[in-house]
Image: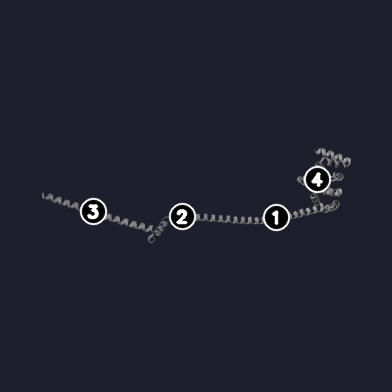
Amino acid sequence: MMVSESRNVDSAKLERNQEGKKKKKGKKGLIFLLILLFVGGASFAAVYFNLFGAKTAFDSLLQKALPGKKTAQSTQKVDLEKVYRQQIAELERQNRDLQSKLKQLQTENSNLQKHLQDVTARLNDIVAKQTDISNKVKDFSGYLQNMDSKKAAKILESLIDTDSQMASAVLKNISGETASEILSNISSNKTIKLLGVSGQSGALQAQNISILVDIYKNIDSRIAASIFENMMGDKEKYNLVLNILKNLDTKTSSQIIASMKPENAAKVTSDLSALK
């Protein structure tokens, strides 16, 4: 019995020894794990915060370990720089083109401004001359208006020889009755030259015909007939005669036609009938 109890005591001591050894091994493993975690954390912190140049050294090691990646990044960087240089060169070329076009437009604008100034100056000269002519016509017309009709006719005849357009303008500014008296004292040939309306627009011819009608309705029918007969040899002037007679009142036109030579009177009567 004593032997049996002794064995039980030994067995219990052995178990306690084994459990103690297990606890010591567990403590050693835990301490190793803690040391490993501490070293790993310190290394990560050193690389992350680049303590003592750890991150730089780590990147250097990675670049040496992965040369293909470094080459790809360098190639990509070179390609981007090339694209940027090309884009900058294109923008500079476009800017030069725009500058050239702007300079050309400025030159054209300057030329246009100069041309406009020249045209304006010429226009002002023309207006000034026309105003001067208009004033002269009014002064001349007023001078002849108050003069004896025979003297006025001689002055107007002289003006016809030097400037028939001015003479015609002066006559048209004189009242109808006075103009008729002056016209009756002017020779037929010069009267034709004075009253000719060749090369004028339709509107201007209509205006002149109205003026001539006012003149011829107050002129002696024999003088008017003589003037008209001398104008019948020219087609354009003859058309003017027909238009004047057409616009005169029936009594005045009949008296003028009756004062013509029979053959001329017959032709004028026939042609007037054709116009109506």
Disc 4 versus disc 3: nearer the observer: 4
Pick whichever, 95 or 244, lies toward us: 244
Density class for disc 3 (Cα within 10 Å; few <14, some 14-19, many ≥20) is few
Q: CA distance from mark 4 to mark 3?
A: 149 Å
Q: Looking at this view, name the residue that lies furthest to the left.
A: 1
Q: Which residue is mark 1?
A: 120
Q: CA distance from mark 3 to mark 2?
A: 55 Å
Identify the secondary structure beneath mark 1.
helix
Picture quadrant of residue 68:
bottom left
Q: CA distance from mark 4 to mark 1?
A: 39 Å
Counting residues from the start of the chain, the first of labels 4 and 3 encountered is 3
Amino acid at the residue labelled 2: Gln
Density class for disc 2 (Cα within 10 Å; few <14, some 14-19, many ≥20) is few
Q: Which residue is mark 2?
A: 73
Q: CA distance from mark 1 to mark 2?
A: 70 Å
Counting residues from the start of the chain, the first of labels 4 and 2 encountered is 2
Counting residues from the start of the chain, the first of labels 4 and 1 encountered is 1
Amino acid at the residue labelled 4: Asp
**Percent position (x, y) of residue 66?**
42, 55
Counting residues from the start of the chain, the first of labels 3 and 2 encountered is 3
Quarter placement of the C terminus: top right
Counting residues from the start of the chain, the first of labels 3 and 1 encountered is 3
Amino acid at the residue labelled 3: Lys
Identify the secondary structure beneath mark 4.
helix
Q: Which residue is mark 3?
A: 23
**Percent position (x, y) of residue 202?**
76, 45
Q: Are marks 4 and 1 in contact (CB under 8 Å)?
A: no
Q: Mark on residue 214?
A: 4
